[in-house]
Image (spheres, grey):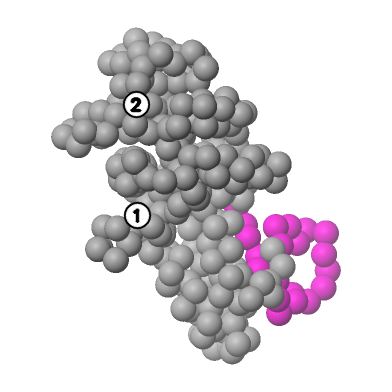
Amino acid sequence: MVKIIMSGCSGRMGRVITELVKEDSEAEIVAGIDIVDDGTLGYPVFKSAGDIDVDADVVIDFSSPKVLDGILDYCTTNNKPLVLCTTGFSDEQLDKISSASEKVAILRSANMSLGINTIMNLLKTATSVFSPAGFDIEIVEQHHHNKLDAPSGTALALADAINEAADGQYEYIYDRSQKREKRDAKELGISAVRAGSIPGTHDVIFAGPDEVIEIRHVAYSRNIFGNGAISAAKFLSGKAAGMYSMQDVIKAQIGE
């Protein structure tokens, strides 16, 4: 049984994960971290990581970059692995995460779904074919109107997968409204839509002469992210210090 501390437990994803874990015989949420506690979660909720007095095996964080320092301090002080699902970290915060991974196991992913992380591998193959052939590449992402960061962390992760396969040749372009010029061959356009209650849609477009290839991922339910986070927590529990990814979880699941 993997004992989990859920950071951001009163938020959308915190509640999704709470409900999913109730049906999981291999995991249990023993405490939460959130400034809000309506008493319905079924476990103790602490306002900050420093207040926790419950033992656990791993922390899942689905909250806000604002609480990163407290989460990292708790995990490094108490030797607890950390699954970081939060997006929108600054470069300084990413450096802190990297430093903390020298002391504890950290898995950071902008998107926890199996589908997105498999698509990243497909994009590397597609880019190796279409980029040398002169295809333009664009990413369009859509999310609910409450999402704070834009573009999404997932869109940036998809772009990074493409750029890695292209040896870093592409420049990310987020806004063309002030430009009146032909599109450069090495632009990678990233567009964001914020509307309604869209959980998350990502389209990657490879547009070449006389043909267009699109790779799309649609999240019909937030459960896919919750299940991914739980799988990551089970995988990370007991792991040695270091930086891990969802690719490591996928490899473990298929026995590599």
**Up/down of 172 relative to 214, above or below:** above
Ranked by sequence position, the earlier of labels 1 and 2 is 2
Numbered tag placed on residue 249 in the rendering: 1
Residue type for callout 1? Val
Residue furthest toward the top?
39
Residue 171 pos. (x, y %): 72, 68
> Is residue 183 shown in magenta?
yes
Residue 229 pos. (x, y %): 36, 42
Q: Residue at x 35, y 21 (%)?
A: 55
**Up/down of 16 relative to 243, above or below:** above
> Is residue 182 shown in magenta?
yes
Is 225 in front, or is 246? Answer: 246
Magenta segment range? 173-193
Residue type for callout 2? Ala
Alpha-carbon span between mark 1 and mark 2: 20 Å
Which quadrant is home to the N terminus?
A: top left
Q: Residue at x 32, y 47 (%)?
A: 235
Asked whether residue 18 appears in the rendered view, the answer is no
Is 82 in front, or is 64? Answer: 82
Asked whether residue 187 appears in the rendered view, the answer is yes
Task: Determine which residue is flagged by label 2.
Answer: 56
**Chief secondary structure of the magenta portion:** loop
Mark 1 closeness class: few <14, some 14–19, many ≥20 residues within 10 Å: many
**Position of residue 84 in the picture relative to residue 31 (left or right):** right
